[in-house]
Image (cartoon, grey):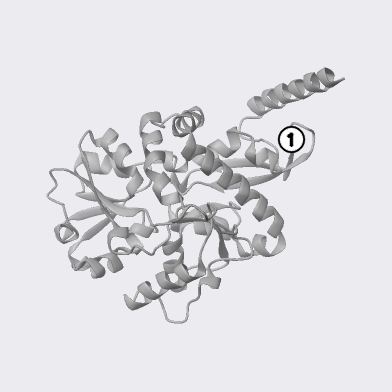
């Protein structure tokens, strides 16, 4: 009896895979699909934080390892274009979930540009925002950025937080020229020499070196703003209010993919490569290895994904002192603490 059930399950899975191959990227319009055991899966669209680099491989891992399916989801993963792009897609309902830089989210919310989204789990406990360049550009400290040309996506946290970074590091932001780029082409722009530096996360170092064939130089924002969180998973306020249990299930499955990826970076990079032709597995694994230090909470007693309201309040105060946020903002405006994993 047991063997029959196993054989049936294997046959069902083979059939499901064959159907998935035939239908390509989920051709059905319905909101459900069947899992291996016949239960209906809820269709969800997830945006990565920024393109399809190693730092975002954990979503593909959660899908590949069946963590999403076990939690009841059929997830379509699409490449995000940074904080601004992910927020607008989630608020408009084009995607249900995606990671944004928490500070970038605060800045956009504070400026009145966006509302109707909430953070429900931390991905990184410290900001990974940085300015990246290569050796030979004459940039070794923030002051060296004056008179230089930098590229990034318009809604990126690196760009939005730059005036605060400049102020706290004692340089003149007005002496820096920003030009627009997108997630896929930024590193090529740096390699071609058309800009002196790009907005980038610190984990981009191995990929920059692979693309430019030069040694990367990074100026991390955490050097002057150590309290800031990195990426956090967001959803719309509407979904958080109407489907809190669904949000918790999704976040748990995604964080499981995150922990697995950090423990098995080489395998995670191979999974990414299977799903994204352009991925560079060696650079992707190196990105994940660098990211590990940013994901683990200080003092390993805390669970991955936790957010501390005291620390968020401190971040808000830093940004308010720098004139980047209006007074009166609270952590509860951007984080749903009922849904955040418990420490």
- Provide residue 164's location: percent of width, then percent of height: 30, 68
Tell which residue pokes out farthest to the right in this image.
Answer: 1
Depth order, front residue of 100/61: 61
Q: Quadrant of the C terminus?
A: bottom right
Describe residue 319's horizontal placement relative to residue 173 as left or right.
Answer: right
For label 1, count other residues whose C-alpha is less than 10 Å away and answer few (under 14), some (14-19) or many (20+): some
- Provide residue 301's location: percent of width, then percent of height: 52, 54
Tell which residue pokes out farthest to the bottom in this image.
Answer: 328
Q: Please, is residue 44 above or below residue 148 in the view?
A: above
Residue 190 visible in image: yes
The residue located at (35%, 45%) in the rendering is: 203
Classify mark 1: helix, strand or loop.
loop
The residue located at (12%, 50%) in the rendering is: 138
Q: Quadrant of the N terminus?
A: top right
- Provide residue 340's location: percent of width, then percent of height: 59, 60
Depth order, front residue of 290/172: 290
The residue located at (51%, 69%) in the rendering is: 309
Depth order, front residue of 306/269: 306
- Provide residue 227's location: percent of width, then percent of height: 38, 64
Q: Please, is residue 215 above or below residue 195 in the view?
A: above
Depth order, front residue of 43/138: 138
Count of numbered labels shown in the rendering: 1
Describe residue 99's horizontal placement relative to residue 341 as left or right.
Answer: left
Describe residue 117's horizontal placement relative to residue 208 as left or right.
Answer: right
> To which residue does mark 1 refer?
35
Residue 111 visible in image: no
């Amino acid at each position: 009896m047991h063997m029959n059930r196993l054989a049936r399950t294997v046959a069902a899975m083979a059939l499901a895979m064959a159907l998935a191959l035939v239908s390509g990227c989920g051709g059905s319009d319905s909101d459900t699909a069947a899992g291996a055991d016949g239960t209906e899966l809820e269709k969800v669209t997830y945006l990565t934080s920024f393109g399809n680099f190693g730092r975002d491989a954990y979503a593909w891992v959660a899908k590949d390892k069946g963590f999403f399916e076990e939690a009841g989801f059929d997830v379509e993963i699409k490449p995000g274009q940074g904080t601004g792009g992910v927020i607008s897609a989630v608020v408009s309902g084009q995607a249900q979930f995606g990671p944004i830089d928490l500070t970038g989210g605060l800045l956009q919310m504070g400026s009145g540009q966006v509302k109707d989204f909430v953070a429900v789990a931390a991905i990184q406990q410290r900001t990974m925002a940085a300015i990246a360049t290569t050796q030979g550009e004459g940039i070794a400290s923030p002051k060296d950025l004056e008179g230089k040309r930098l590229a990034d996506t318009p809604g990126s946290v690196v760009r939005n937080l730059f005036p605060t970074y400049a102020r706290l590091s004692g340089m003149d932001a007005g002496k820096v020229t920003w030009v627009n780029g997108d997630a896929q082409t930024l590193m090529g722009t740096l390699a071609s020499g058309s800009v002196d530096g790009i907005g980038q996360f610190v984990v981009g170092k191995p990929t920059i070196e692979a693309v430019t064939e030069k040694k990367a130089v990074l100026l991390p924002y955490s050097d002057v703003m150590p309290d800031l969180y990195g990426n956090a998973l967001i959803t719309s306020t509407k979904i958080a209010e109407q489907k809190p249990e669904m949000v918790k299930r999704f976040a748990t499955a995604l964080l499981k993919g995150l922990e697995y990826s950090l423990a098995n970076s080489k395998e995670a990079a191979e999974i990414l490569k299977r799903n994204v032709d352009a991925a560079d597995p060696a650079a992707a694994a190196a990105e994940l290895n660098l990211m590990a230090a940013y994901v683990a909470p200080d003092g390993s007693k805390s669970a991955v994904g936790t957010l501390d309201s005291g620390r968020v309040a401190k971040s808000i105060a830093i940004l308010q002192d720098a004139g980047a946020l209006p007074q009166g903002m609270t952590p509860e405006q951007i984080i749903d603490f009922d849904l955040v994993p418990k420490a």
